[in-house]
Image (cartoon, rainbow, N blue to C red):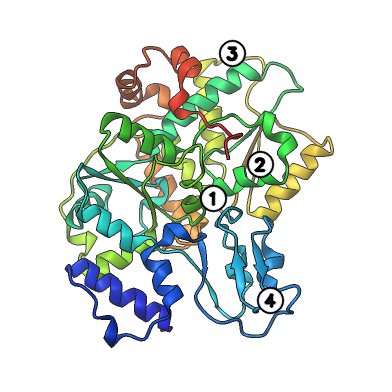
């Protein structure tokens, strides 16, 4: 275990136990400590070790791997990661042979905020959660485990994936009226959206201005409970960067990974398998399968068909997962090779289930997501009474009104 890991484990153990850490008994680096205590002041990737000399001074591998040019090397030899440019993709971490880079960990300030919250605290759990903490942990058991560490409730973000599926289906129905029209999605993947915005910006007119299910969940919770604290939990580091973007900032107070929550359970001695099973079932199959590649396009396709079974121009999908495949798909689209009208991109191979902070491998994750999707009571958002009831609570009496006035679920990509 590295000195950074030792520091992290000691601080987490004491935070869970409500003790103040005696720093005199620990060897620590001031930069590492500041990252752990104040992650919001740093990029989603931290340098926690020394470069090992494997890279050239002018072209370090970590910098070459970053498509957003967020990584540079200063005159002092230290890596500099620009918080404004870093999208949290983790390519630099994978490229670093010295193990000097690591994904941010926001758990310490999150635990402090949970403990001192003035209003209800909600865990917003990503659709990829099933099976992450054990194949036998049900959603109800996980809800009970989260309550044991201070959360007041757990909200399945799959319900808001339902809402965004409905939104994208309505937009497709409204905008795709000829063989020359096409739409780019997925709103749920911050890597895909960042790549289009920053590298292929000429395609932005084809991107529906929809927030991600994470942001939709956070905004909805805060609309219904203005004093709530919202904590998103998933397999993705890039979500940490997304939550800080100017046009969506404030919807989600903290973003934690499955691995961070597992660390908390271990430090607190909580076994989710032994927790009470409280059953609640609010999301449809469409929302639940967002976690795997192809899930968004499949969900939108089913919902458009449910809206208009006889529509002359149906949803013709093409999807790519992993950055190289996404780039190839976009470049073929730009060159005129287009055999679809709905293009789905996911930054991680396999989709969210292949995220860098997932606990189980992506094949197991996909099996879990499909199993959870198949167990859903409702096939599409239009069949889900919870979606329609929630929209009414938000002030939308019809689905048409939802499309026309759904500012809560829209993004302003021009705001920086």
Foreground disc of the pair 2, 1: 2
Residue occupied by mark 3:
310
Residue closest to the far right: 335
* Secondary structure of the residue carrying numbered label 1: loop
Labelled pair 3, 1 in contact (Cβ < 8 Å): no
**Which of 319 and 312 lies nearest the eye of the viewer?**
319
Q: Position of residue 1 (x, y in %)?
A: 41, 84
Residue occupied by mark 1:
351
Q: Position of residue 415 (x, y in %)?
A: 57, 35
- Residue visible at 50% across and 25% down? 167
Cα distance in 3D space between marks 4 and 2: 31 Å
Residue occupied by mark 2:
197
Q: Looking at the image, is 276 positioned above or below residue 173?
A: below
Q: Position of residue 32 (x, y in %)?
A: 43, 74
Foreground disc of the pair 3, 2: 2
Cα distance in 3D space between marks 3 and 1: 31 Å
Tell me if residue 271 can be seen: yes
Question: Which label is found at residue 75?
Answer: 4
Quarter occupied by the C terminus:
top right
Q: Using residue 34 as the reference point, say whether residue 9 is left or right of it.
A: left
Q: Earlier in the sequence, mark 4 or mark 2?
A: 4
* Secondary structure of the residue carrying numbered label 4: loop
Foreground disc of the pair 3, 1: 1
Q: Earlier in the sequence, mark 3 or mark 2?
A: 2
Cα distance in 3D space between marks 4 and 3: 64 Å
Foreground disc of the pair 1, 4: 4
């Amino acid at each position: 275990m590295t000195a950074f890991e030792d520091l992290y484990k000691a601080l987490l153990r004491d935070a869970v136990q409500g003790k103040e850490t005696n720093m005199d008994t620990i060897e620590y680096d001031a930069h590492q400590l500041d990252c752990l205590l104040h992650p919001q002041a740093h990029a989603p990737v931290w340098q926690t070790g020394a470069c090992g000399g494997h890279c050239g001074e002018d072209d370090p591998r970590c910098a070459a791997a970053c498509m957003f040019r967020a990584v540079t090397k200063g005159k002092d030899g230290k890596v500099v990661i620009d918080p404004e440019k870093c999208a949290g993709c983790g390519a630099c971490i994978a490229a670093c042979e010295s193990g000097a880079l690591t994904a941010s960990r926001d758990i310490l300030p999150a635990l402090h905020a949970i403990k001192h919250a003035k209003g209800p605290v909600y865990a917003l759990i990503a659709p990829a959660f099933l099976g992450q903490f054990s194949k036998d942990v049900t959603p109800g058991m996980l809800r009970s485990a989260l309550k044991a560490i201070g959360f007041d409730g757990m909200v399945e973000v799959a319900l808001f994936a339902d809402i965004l599926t409905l939104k994208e289906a309505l937009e497709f129905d409204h905008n795709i009226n000829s063989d020359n029209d096409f739409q780019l999605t997925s709103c749920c993947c911050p890597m895909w959206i960042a790549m289009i915005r920053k590298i292929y910006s000429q395609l932005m007119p084809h991107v529906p201005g929809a927030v991600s299910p994470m942001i939709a969940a956070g905004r909805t919770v805060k609309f219904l409970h203005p004093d709530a604290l919202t904590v998103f939990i998933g397999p993705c580091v890039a979500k940490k960067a997304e939550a800080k973007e100017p046009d969506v900032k404030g919807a989600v107070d903290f973003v934690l990974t499955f691995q961070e929550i597992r660390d908390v359970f271990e430090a607190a001695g909580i076994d989710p398998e032994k927790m009470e099973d409280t059953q609640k079932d609010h999301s449809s199959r469409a929302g639940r399968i967002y976690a795997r590649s192809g899930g968004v396009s499949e969900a939108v396709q089913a919902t458009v068909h449910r809206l208009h079974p006889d529509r002359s121009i149906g949803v013709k999908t093409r999807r790519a997962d992993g950055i190289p495949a996404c780039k190839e798909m976009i470049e073929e689209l730009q060159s005129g090779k287009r055999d679809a009208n709905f293009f789905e991109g996911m930054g991680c191979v396999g989709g969210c289930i292949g995220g860098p902070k997932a606990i189980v491998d992506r094949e197991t994750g996909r099996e879990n997501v499909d199993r959870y999707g198949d167990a859903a009571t409702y096939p599409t958002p239009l069949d889900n009474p919870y979606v329609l009831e929630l929209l009414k609570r938000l002030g939308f009496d019809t689905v048409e009104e939802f499309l026309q006035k759904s500012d809560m679920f829209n993004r302003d990509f021009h705001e920086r």
